[in-house]
Image (tube, rainbow, N blue to C red):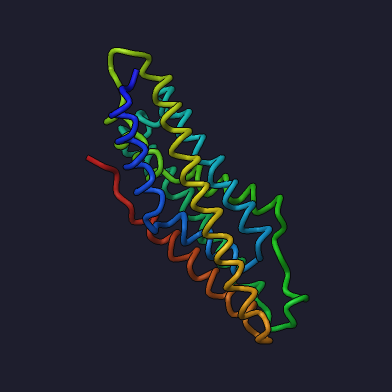
Amino acid sequence: MLSSQAFLLFLTAALLVAITPGPGIFYIVARTLAGGRTEGLASSVGLGLGGLVHVLGGALGVSALIMASAEAFTVLKIAGATYLIWLGVKTWGEAHIVAPAEVPTTGARRALREGIVVEALNPKTAGFFLAFIPQFIDPTAGVATQFVVLGLISVTLNTGVDLIVTHWATRARAGLAKRPTFIARTRQASGAVMCGLGATLLVARRAS
C-alpha cells in the first residue's frame, strides 16, 4: 500500500487540483447564481456522484477502454457536450425579466440528476483520473482498491470545494438580488456559461 509520504503527496496534489478553477467550479457558480443555494448544493453533490462513476469505471478498466477508443470517446464527448448546451439554452430561455420570486427554478432533485449526468458524460474526467491517480498507486498491492480509495478522496475534496464555492456564490446572489432584473440576468449568464462549457467539451481531444 501507499507510504505515508506518498499519501501526503497525493493529498497535496489532489487539493491543488480541487481548488484550481475549472469547468466544474464554473458550472457550480452558474447553477447557484441561476437557481440559488439549494440548486447549487444539489449540483455539487451531483457532480460528486458523477465523479464516482468515473472512479468505479477506472477501477474496473472501463474508463481505460473508453479513452483507448477514439469512437467511444467521441460518442461520450458529444453526448456530454450536447447535454450541457441543452441545459444552457433551456436556462437562458427561462430567464424572463420578472420579479425574483417569480423566476422559475429547477429544483434540488432535478439539479442533482443533471449534475450527475453532466459529470458522468464528461470523458475528460475519466482521462484525468486515469492520468492522475495511477501516479500514486503501489503496483505491488491491490491496484483496484487503491484506485477506488484515492478516487474517493479526490472526489470528496472536489465536492468540498464545490460546496464552498456554492456558499460564496449564494452570498453574491443574495447581495445583488435586490435589483429587479438581476436574477433573470444571472440566469441568462448562467445559460451562456453552460453553453460555453459544452462547446469546450465538444472540441476536447482524446489524450494520446
Quarter of the figure with the N terminus:
top left
In this picture, residue 74 sits left or right of residue 35: left
Residue at the spot 33% in from the left edge and 22% down from the top edge: 2
- Between 82 and 13, the residue placed more toward the observer is 13
Q: Nearer the viewer, residue 170 or 128?
A: 170
Name the spot of residue 13 as percent of width and height, x first. Answer: 32, 42
Q: Is residue 58 above or below residue 200?
A: above
Q: Is residue 24 left or right of residue 143?
A: right
Residue 106 lies left or right of residue 43; in this view the side is right
What percent of the width, then of the height, locates residue 175? 62, 78
Figure check: 161 above or below 98: above
Q: Residue at x 29, y 20 (%)?
A: 138
Q: Quadrant of residue 186?
A: bottom right
User: Where's residue 173, x and y in %?
Assistant: 61, 73
In this view, 118 is above or below 154: below
Query: How many tags in the picture?
Result: 0
Q: Residue furthest front?
A: 4
Residue at point 37%, 42% (across, down): 14
- Compared with 161, 63 (above or below) is above
Q: Residue furthest left?
A: 208
In the rendered image, the quadrant that contains the C terminus is top left
Which of the 4 image quadrants contains residue 184?
bottom right
Residue 161: percent from left, percent from top: 49, 52
Outermost residue, bottom side: 180
* Closer-to-camera residue (31/136): 136
Residue under the image location 75 percent in, 82 percent down: 99
